[in-house]
Image (cartoon, rainbow, N blue to C red):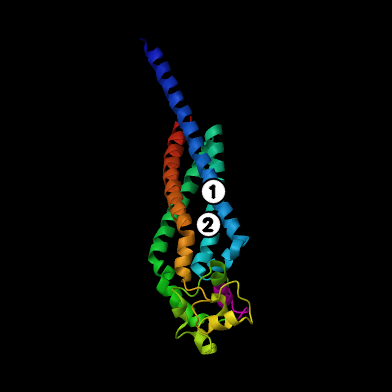
Amino acid sequence: MGQGEVSARGSAMEGDCLSCMKYLMFIFNFFIFLGGSFLLSVGVWVLVDPMGFREIVAANPVLFTGVYVILAMGSMLFLLGFLGCCGAIRENKCLLLFFFMLILFIFLAELAAAILAFLFREHLTREYFSRELKRHYQGHNNTDVFTSTWNAIMTTFNCCGVSGPEDFEESLFRLLSPSKMVPEACCQRNSSPGDVSVEQCVSGSMVFRHNKGCYSAMVDYFEMYIYTAGALAIVVLTIELFAMVFAMCLFRGIQ
């Protein structure tokens, strides 16, 4: 076998490997594109205010900021997938290099966000929300953002307080309304202002009020979505790592 034939076979194998890498790169970036589209959809879904969700996340600035973080990350992943697909199909080294740098930046940003979420996890505890509710909730006051937000939460999820109606003991609400044990937002929906059931509810009757805390109600409601989001985050990070490896290999293989 001559040296020229060996060289030709080597070049053919290298070309096949490069072609395989190109299509693998395209597939991975297509999934990144889909992931970005999903995050964008979630962010837009929250901002259009379904079921009072915007008021719910507005109760905590950390959560409300997270909506815009989701939008930003979704937009960047959307752009990444597009750049990666174009760079792979066209074998454009500039697009591939720009893609690699951008996905590296996103990966580091996601890592930093995970660290910050771990450091500030105390802001999402039951005790934190209970303390804030006792300090700032006023009852029936539509001009106060914090109060109207909690009214929306309790009405939407059919709950009362953070852990339960006992959260309103020794609170600002009781100081402002000493004759009421719980606010009207804790009363069952079939009750209307002026009904005897509402009067009994705010006076402390357990029959006409919701006795489940909002923290448990919201965790139960969003439990499936939380696990789904966690699994999706792991999948996205894995895809990003593979995409960076493929991008660099394809970049080096393009003549």
- For label 1, the SS is helix
Task: Give the magenta-colored segment's residue range.
Answer: 141-151
Q: How many marks can you see?
A: 2
View extreme (top): residue: 1
Q: Residue 191 carries which label?
A: none
On the image, the x and y values in percent for residue 239 come to 44, 43
On the image, the x and y values in percent for residue 163 come to 43, 73
Which of marks 1 and 2 precedes in the sequence? 1
* Residue position marked by numbered label 1 in the rendering: 36
Is residue 123 covered in magenta?
no
* Residue position marked by numbered label 2 in the rendering: 70
- Residue count near mark 2 (Cα–Cα under 10 Å), binned few <14, some 14–19, many ≥20: some
- Residue count near mark 1 (Cα–Cα under 10 Å), binned few <14, some 14–19, many ≥20: many
Q: Give the residue type at disc 2.
A: Ile
On the image, the x and y values in percent for residue 12 come to 44, 20
Residue closest to the eye, 94 or 90: 90
Q: Give the residue type at disc 1.
A: Gly
What whole-number distance in Å separates the C-alpha atoms at marks 2 and 1? 9 Å
- Residue 139 sits in quarter: bottom right
Is residue 147 covered in magenta?
yes
Q: Which quarter of the rendering shows the N terminus?
A: top left
Assess whether mark 1 and mark 2 are in contact (beta carbons under 8 angstroms).
no
